[in-house]
Amino acid sequence: MHVFPYSPRPHARAKDFPNQVDGITKRFRVNEMLNLNREMALSYRRKFLNKSLEVLVERAEGGIAFGHSENYLQVSFPSAAENNELIRVKIVEADYPVSIGKEQADV
C-alpha cells in the first residue's frame, strides 16, 4: 500500500475543489492507513510462520543474509550464503517489514 497526503500543486484542478481537508485530518488519515497497512502486512506474514520458503539472497553481511521469498516476503536469517543464492528458509518470526528465518538443511 502506498499512502501519501494530497497537497495542492500549481495548475492542478484539484487545488480549487471545495471542501479541502485540513492538515491535521490529512495526517490522521495517513496514520490510520499506515497502521492498517502494518496490520495487513503482519497478518499476511503470519500465514508463513513455521513454513519453509525459498529465499533469494540479495545481501549478506556479518553472517546474516537478507533477501526476498518467492511470495515477496523480506527475510533475514543467519547464514554463510552469498548474494544470488537460493536458500530454503523456515520463517521463525513474522515481523514487518522483515521476517526472521532459519536456514534449512538440504533434504
Image (spheres, helix red, strand yellow):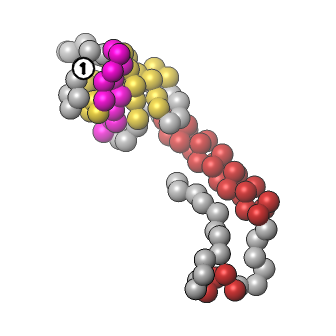
Q: Position of residue 49 (x, y in %)?
A: 46, 26
- Packing grade of label 1 (10 A; few <14, some 14-19, many >=20) is many
Say which residue label 1 marks.
Answer: 81
Q: Is residue 60 above or below residue 78?
A: below
Say which residue appears at 50% left-offset and 40% top-offset.
Answer: 44
Label 1 element class? loop
Say which residue appears at 26% left-offset and 15% top-offset.
Answer: 80
Write the start and end of the magenta stretch as one range. Answer: 59-70
Say which residue appears at 60% left-offset and 60% top-offset.
Answer: 4
Say which residue appears at 73% left-offset and 57% top-offset.
Answer: 27
Q: Is residue 63 magenta?
A: yes
Q: Position of residue 79 (x, y in %)?
A: 31, 16
Identified by mark 1, the residue type is Ala
Q: Is residue 49 magenta?
A: no
Res 51 seen here = no
Say whether residue 88 is left or right of residue 100: left
Q: Is residue 64 above or below residue 39?
A: above
Say whether residue 52 is left or right of residue 106: right
51 vs 92, nearest the viewer: 92
Res 95 seen here = yes
Q: Position of residue 21 (x, y in %)?
A: 76, 71
